[in-house]
Amino acid sequence: MGTVHARSLEPLPASGPDFGALGEEAEFVEVEPEAKQEVLENKDVVVQHVHFDGLGRTKDDIIMYEIGDVFKAKNLIEVLGLKLPNLLGRAEKVTFQFSYGTKETSYGLSFFKPQPGHFERNFSVNLYKVTGQFPWSSLRETDRGVSAEYSFPIWRTSHTVKWEGVWRELGCLSRTASFAVRQESGHSLKSSLSHAMVIDSRNSSILPRRGALLKVNQELAGYTGGDVSFIKEDFELQLNKQLLLDTVFSASLWGGMLVPIGDKPSSIADRFYLGGPTSVRGFSMHSVGPQSEGDYLGGEAYWAGGLHLYTPLPFRPGQGGFGELFRTHFFLNAGNLCNLNYGEGPRAHIRKLAECIRWSYGAGIVLRLGNIARLELNYCVPMGVQSGDRICDGVQFGAGIRFL
């Protein structure tokens, strides 16, 4: 479904750069195409002997936990297990990631430590540097940071508690950058504590057919040091229902609020952004809401929602094979982004968020790339356009891992 980035750093995750397990998209556990998995699941196997290499420094308890179910396997899928480089002999791992592009360069070093026998409980430490360019704001940002987080389940929910310290350097991307962006240029140090809760019953992270998702994030910056202070809350709700004739109805709702602490205003790097093929379709990327001289500054409060209907391709070409990766897509999106006067009270906030609603509708084609990402090609009709908004009236292409 969709995403509204809680900072100017698109392509960074909304919760900050993570290098341990693909950031907040670590719930993607299916990486093989479903057709291939079905073939493997239909092949009976008998496990009589298993040979392991490199057990010199691996402790017995971790091995017994990992291979206990292998001898009970009934098909090949159940035999394929998990490969973890053992740094200290108990499934610890160290990962280094590097990427280079014309608009973003990043590298990071992470250490991951699971609890033996309970891999859903784990601790990780990350060191990173990320540089990105964001033309919708005429902004360049470089983040150098360190983070430590602990993930654990409680009943049907999964939680992550995180501390992050990041030195941020903001600069202008061009000489024509607005004065408002130039004022934001410079260095800042953010130290924050955050908590994320996830409930996910979907059958797939990309184009789910059934199930629901709830994500709630809280972040408190300033109380552990740094010169940036705020409270930020945001959530994501998604519901999916399979109907007749292999048709799927999906609904989603997103929202968030950023409240600065003290007299210092919020930073352009911490605000929310809206618009684009992954959020309110029919509008250009992050080109909705407050702006100055053509540069979009983000907002301290937003909401966005979407209704979707996914159907098979007409006449179902390639049924049972490549054609199953495609879906016809009908959608209705709406949302708003603004700044609030927090002294006015909740009713005034709701009234302002209900004013000048941007919305759009249209149809197109969706391609599922395994369970990792998806591509969209839609014909969009933007509505509720306000002065300063940039629109994409007609065909719009989008690619990503999270869509509204």
Image: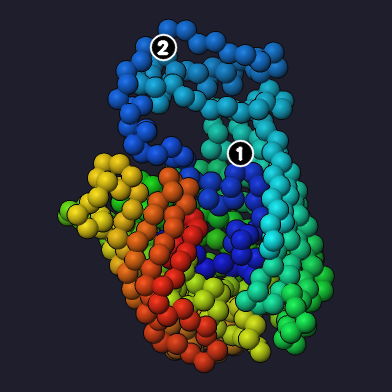
Q: Nearer the viewer, mark 1 or mark 2?
A: 2
Residue located farthest toward the left when viewing the structure as drawn = 244
What colour scheme was applied to this rendering of the protein?
Answer: rainbow
Residue closest to the eye, 156 or 127:
127
Q: Which mark is residue 396?
A: none
Three-letter code for the amino acid on which mark 2 is drawn: Val
Element class at badge 2: loop
Residue located farthest toward the top when viewing the structure as drawn = 48
- Quadrant assignment for the N terminus: bottom left
Q: Are marks 1 and 2 in contact (CB under 8 Å)?
A: no
Residue 16 in percent (x, y) is at 65, 58
Seen in the image, is 330 located left or right of residue 266? Answer: left
Q: Give the quadrant of residue 102.
A: bottom right
Residue 371 in percent (x, y) is at 43, 46
Seen in the image, is 102 located left or right of residue 319? Answer: right
Dot 1 corresponds to which residue?
122
Dot 2 corresponds to which residue?
47
Residue closest to the eye, 229 or 212:
212
Mark 1 nearby-residue class (10 Å; few <14, some 14–19, many ≥20): some
